[in-house]
Amino acid sequence: MPDWAREVRARLSSLTLSPEREAEIVDELAQHLDDRWRELIAGGASPDDATRLTLADFRQRDVLARRMATLRQAHPPASVTPGVATGRLLGDLRHDLRYATRTMAARPGFTAVAVLSLALSIGADTAIFSLWNGVLHASLPAVREPDQLVMLSNPDESGSWTGRTQGPRSWLTYGEFEQLRDHAEGFSAIMASQSSLNTWQVRFEGGDWEEARGRLVSGGFFQALGVAPAIGRLFTAADDRTDTPDAVISHDYWKRRFGGRFDVLGKTLTVRKAVLTIIGVAPPGFIGETSGQRPDLWLPLRMQPSVLPGSDRLHDTPPEKTMWLHVFGRLTPGVTPAQAEAQANAVFRAGLESFYGGIATPERRRELLDQRLQIGPAGRGASPTRHEFSQSLTALLAGVAVLLLIACANLANLLLARGAVRTPEMALRLSLGASRGRLIRQLVTESLALAAIGGAAAIAVAYGLHGALVRMLAESDPRFQSRRPSRSRTGFTAPWCGCWRNPTRASI
Amino acid sequence: MDARALDRELKKGSAELLILSLLAARARHGYELNKVIHARSRGQLRFHIDSLYPLLYRLEERGWIKGVWVEKPGERRRRFYHVTAEGRRVLARQRKTWAAFVEAVRRVTGDEHA
């Protein structure tokens, strides 16, 4: 019987099949020829005739190769020796990544320790940095050009004071705000807001009483902050001259309390004995002028006697003043903060002289007039607790930075130890033709893959830790309220993994 | 197109249909496939070995059939082919197309006789 395998192999010789595939094809076709030969023999043909007739099943000698040449299996990819360059950058990268994955899977203990080290250190660093940045450096969210905002009161103070004071003012009175609004020309927009946040018992449309946080603001509040309503309308400067009982609610409260229904507009809201009408919803993310506080609603300042009964904070009687407002402004283009401060103080002083005009003693008058306004940047908003948390958060950030360095050193040691173990492997690959540069690229790819996995795990750690830190701070100080994690805002980018934007913010 | 070229094209187009149809009934090896085609066509159709196997490998690369080495006691191992789910979908389409083609030809040739 002829050697059918040899016959088939000869007809495949011009192809570049993989050795395994060629062996399979030779095996299969040789069986076919053998079956045919045996059938012919069984049918009475002589061995020579049977061989000739069987081989006649092949037409010209190259037909099989030509038919096979169009198949993918006739063009197998070139074999790759790990570490040997193929000349294709992306292809090499894919091979390197696949090899890195196999290497990591082969040493699960090492991989787990490395990933955990990276995840915990980067995660802790990111969470603390996120908190530190949000508390100390983040601008007011959803406010137009917050860097252009200035403040004429003390951003670190909240509350009120009735009586007399000296030196730089922490808060202003309603009358003083009105004078500045009407006469200070250094500001293109000016507004006032209650320095503290109220927690009111409110009810909607005669329903049950419920708790809501709110703040009294002047008519120009939203205009000065440069925000537009999500639905309805917001207060305007004209609202300062009327006693219209209107209310604006926050977007978060609208979604949470009213399910985002549009028929919220026109609903009545009862605060104490005042019945107000909801006229609009603030834009998403807007929390107002005080960082770290999230009011549910804003009411006009002129509603103070109704919603904060007990005293009339809108009118002062000499020599007592009720100071309770933060005042913010946007500088008129071309006016420097120093010029605006001088102008504001001129108006302020004129108001004081008019107010204390009845005081006869010059010494007493001089004492009472020893008050001034200081203008400062307000892009980060007011915050009664920012200063308090500043030192501890900075110390914490420094601590976790050291922790990150320790983790990096630890990981470097681990990689070094593993490198020593892999010396025979590297020697083998060098002997197979890999260049040193190619091996270095492979090792760098492995390290980057490890860092990427660690960075991804760090995101989860950062989320969890950030939430825990915010809860801890909120428990320690009820004035602290976190902004909910948001992917939409630019923040701290973890430079070591370079693949995610800080998803969380909190501020005071 | 001359008669030989037409004949070649018809055979080429129908070859896939023949193989898919036979393998859809049950798994077969290459030699058996060829014998069945030869027998059922009463000697009219028969594949050369250098046509049959490249075609089987092409259908396998397309994912329409799948070859598996089967080893039975006392026999040599053989590579049996069966139709995949994708192959069955292709077969259904090809049967439909073929039926439409045959019907069209029948109408044309029928008109000649009318």
Image: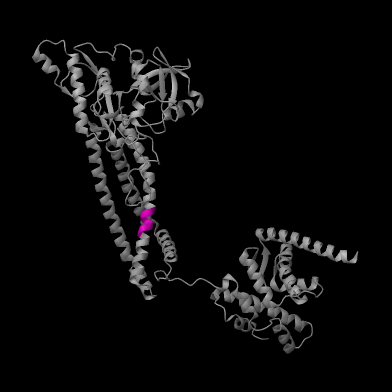
Q: Is the magenta stretch mostly helix, strand or loop?
A: helix
Direction from residue A392 to residue A36 in the image, left or right: right
In the rendered image, the vertical position of residue A31 relative to residue A229, given as above or below: below
B68 or A166: nearer the viewer: A166
Q: How is the image coloured?
A: one colour
For residue B43, what is the image quadrant? bottom right
| Res A426 seen here | yes
Q: Where is residue A195 in the image (x, y as percent from the top left)?
A: 28, 24
For residue A293, what is the image quadrant? top left
Seen as rendered, the residue at the extreme left is: A363
Q: Is residue A448 magenta?
A: yes
Q: Residue at x 39, y 25 (%)?
A: A296
A155 or A49: nearer the viewer: A155
Q: Where is residue A371 in the image (x, y as percent from the top left)?
A: 16, 22
Q: Which residue is drawn at 37% across and 61% down?
A: A445
Q: In which quarter of the image is the N terminus of chain A?
A: bottom right
Direction from residue A41 to residue A407 in the image, left or right: left
A357 or A427: nearer the viewer: A357
Q: How many marks?
A: 0
Q: Residue at x 28, y 22 (%)?
A: A182
| Res A325 seen here | no
Magenta stretch in the rendered image: A447-452
Q: Where is residue A109 in the image (x, y as percent from the top left)?
A: 37, 56
Q: Does the magenta stretch include residue B55?
A: no
A64 or A268: nearer the viewer: A268
Q: Position of residue A438 (x, y in %)?
A: 36, 69
Q: Residue at x 72, y 79 (%)?
A: A36
In the rendered image, the vertical position of residue A190 relative to residue B60, given as above or below: above
In the rendered image, the vertical position of residue A241 relative to residue A437, given as above or below: above
Q: In which quarter of the image is the C terminus of chain A?
A: top left
Seen as rendered, the residue at the extreme right is: B114
